[in-house]
Image: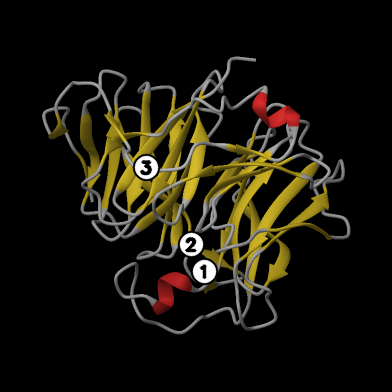
Amino acid sequence: MSALPPSNLLRRPGPPEPVPDVDPPRAFDPRFSQVVSQEARLVSLYDQATFSEGPTWWPARRILVWSDIEGRRVLGWQQDGCVRVVIDATPFINGNTVDRDGNLIHCEHGNRRLSRTTPTGAYAGLVETYEGRRFNAPNDVVCAADGALWFTDPAYGLRQPKQGALDESDLGHHSVYRFDPATGGVRRMADFGQPNGLAFAPDGRTLYVSDTARTEGGDGHTIHAFPVAEDQTLGARRLFAEVEPGVPDGFRVDRRGWIWTSSEAGVQVFASDGYRLGLIPTPQVCSNCCFSPGEDRLFITSKQYLYALDLIPG
């Protein structure tokens, strides 16, 4: 895997492309219309990926990065419209986040671990085992306020050769973990059928995790919520929301505490009490989303596309 120089250009500077034949945002609650205009329309920022996932804003490079899992690349969109390959020949990188030091953190299906890329392009592995056994295929990751990295570890990368390598689980369970980069310690926090997306509430006191398993004890389309104690242990889980059609593959929480989640229909938005506020339709199944630094733009990954939708500044 290599971090490439800025000459590796995939899209030249220029305006985004309008997305035709897609329904406008749909409000189920007046609060949604204060954030998402009914006149807002999707635009396409890039359309040549293979399977897009794991979007996150990387402040150190001032770019939106996302994974082309099956294309084995991490791509970067610049505000002038350029798209470049940021990292090539990846080990099927999926989820990405940024740590407190400004590094880009990756979930690697192929190497079955977390890794890190610095703003200067230096790359290294971070953690790949729990109690001496390899992880399944880390999927999504988030950095907590204290700098710990929380991540999900389903088995999808062990079952889909286009997104990993066929293998058996060393662990025999699919879990959420907390990794402390300062100490190197790894804690198993919760088990699921297939844990997938995860995010914290703005105050850090609630952790949301989706379960996208349709077998093995999972329900396939739910988001669960856990209270987070001062010692970073989790309290009893509760069902937060059922997301249909499709599954909550990836999601983000905004400064209001609203959950913006992927689904087959597009991005569905829920208030912190679980009430469904609205829908942003997408032409294909949505895989994930994230915000610009000021939360005035929503970025959406969907198959070969990176979409964007401008939001009402709050």
Please tell me how crowded label 2 is: few (under 14), some (14-19), or many (20+) other residues with Cα within 10 Å.
some
User: How far separated are the C-alphas under marks 3 and 1?
Assistant: 22 Å
Q: Secondary structure at mark 1?
A: loop
Give the quadrant of residue 211.
bottom right
Indicate the secondary structure of the residue bearing disc 2: loop
Q: Are marks 2 and 3 in contact (CB under 8 Å)?
A: no
Q: Earlier in the sequence, mark 3 or mark 1?
A: 3
The numbered mark, 1 or 2, whose residue comes first in the sequence reads 2
Q: Is 157 located above or below residue 250 in the figure? A: below
- Circle 2 sits on which residue? 128
Can you identify the residue that label 1 sits on?
A: 135
Furthest-top residue in this view: 313
Mark 3, residue position: 66
Q: Residue drawn 70% across and 81% down? A: 217
Dots 3, 1 in contact, CB < 8 A: no
Viewer-closest of 102 and 237: 237
Indicate the secondary structure of the residue bearing disc 3. strand
Place residue 26 in its image quadrant.
top right
Q: Is the C-beta separation of discs 1 and 2 under 8 Å?
A: yes
